[in-house]
Amino acid sequence: MQEKKKDVLLKTDAEAIRLAKTLLRSARHGALAALEPGTGAPFASRVAVATDHDGAPLILVSALSTHTPCIEGDPRCALLLGEAGKGDALAHARITISCLAEKIARDDVRHERIARRFLSRNPKSKLYAGFGDFSFFRLEPQKASLNGGFGKAYALTAADLLTAAPDPDAIAASEAGAVEHMNRDHADAVSRIARHYGKAGLENGWVMTGIDADGFDLVAGDQVLRIFFDQPLTTDADIHRELVAMAVKARKAEAEGNDAGQGAL
């Protein structure tokens, strides 16, 4: 009698979904695997990454790159995300997302939003984003394999990864103004939020790069933080309310921490 194969996958829970979304939202680059035209042989390369409002990965690629005709000829591809970190690379969390690549034409109504979000996350790409041979692609997730470390394997659906919002267009329309306002007028608050909610160090210089219904992204140099809201936003009016509440809480916590430190002297 043949022995039944042990299922190595764990049940997907809220913690696994949060880890998967964190890896996805905080990624600045990843390994893209696609199929070569004609041969069907696999080809992998590194690409810069950002995410659309719903969490779908975004890439900017040149027509001269080997992977571009691959995904134009066959949209099936896979994206590996996750930083190796120190020590054993296989001990660190990573996620492989099976996707269908969609080229975003310059006259597509989504192009402006996608370009803004990508270039906000990857500002150096502004040097060539306008060149005629460069195009944005949206990678539509189909499923994902999450490895959270030894013995922590999960199979995720597209719904597990993507962010659903009642009025995503309104939130997207308000995003640019809210991000600009926070970075221009409330830079200190942004850094406090990074320290309190993201457990960042004492350094300042954190910049907000994007807001979506689930949370927002902060960047300082090569560091990226993903900060989640306690509850997903339902309207664009929620953006201001949530950011103000989080800034007040972060400032209060910092003040109380300073008072405690002074009292110990």
Image (spheres, rainbow, N blue to C red):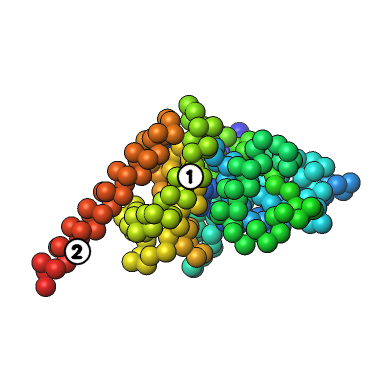
Q: Give whichever of discs 1 and 2 has the lower sequence position.
A: 1
Q: Secondary structure at mark 1?
A: helix
Which residue does the numbered mark 2 point to in the structure image?
258
Return the x and y of residue 236 as percentages of the image width and height: 44, 34
Residue 87 appears in the figure = yes
| Quadrant (top left, top right, bottom left, bottom right) of the C terminus | bottom left
How far apart are the two marked residues, 1 and 2, measured between alpha carbons? 33 Å
x and y percentages locating residue 73 in the rendered image: 82, 42
- The image quadrant that residue 199 belongs to is bottom left
Identify the residue at horizontal 66%, vertical 35% (top origin): 109
Q: Residue at x 10, y 67 (%)?
A: 263
Q: Residue at x 46, y 53 (%)?
A: 208
Q: Which residue is mark 1?
A: 177
Say whether residue 18 is left or right of residue 173.
left
Q: Amino acid at mark 2?
A: Asn
Q: Does residue 133 lie above or below 213 as drawn? A: below
Question: Relative to 187, does residue 174 appear above or below in the rendering?
Answer: above
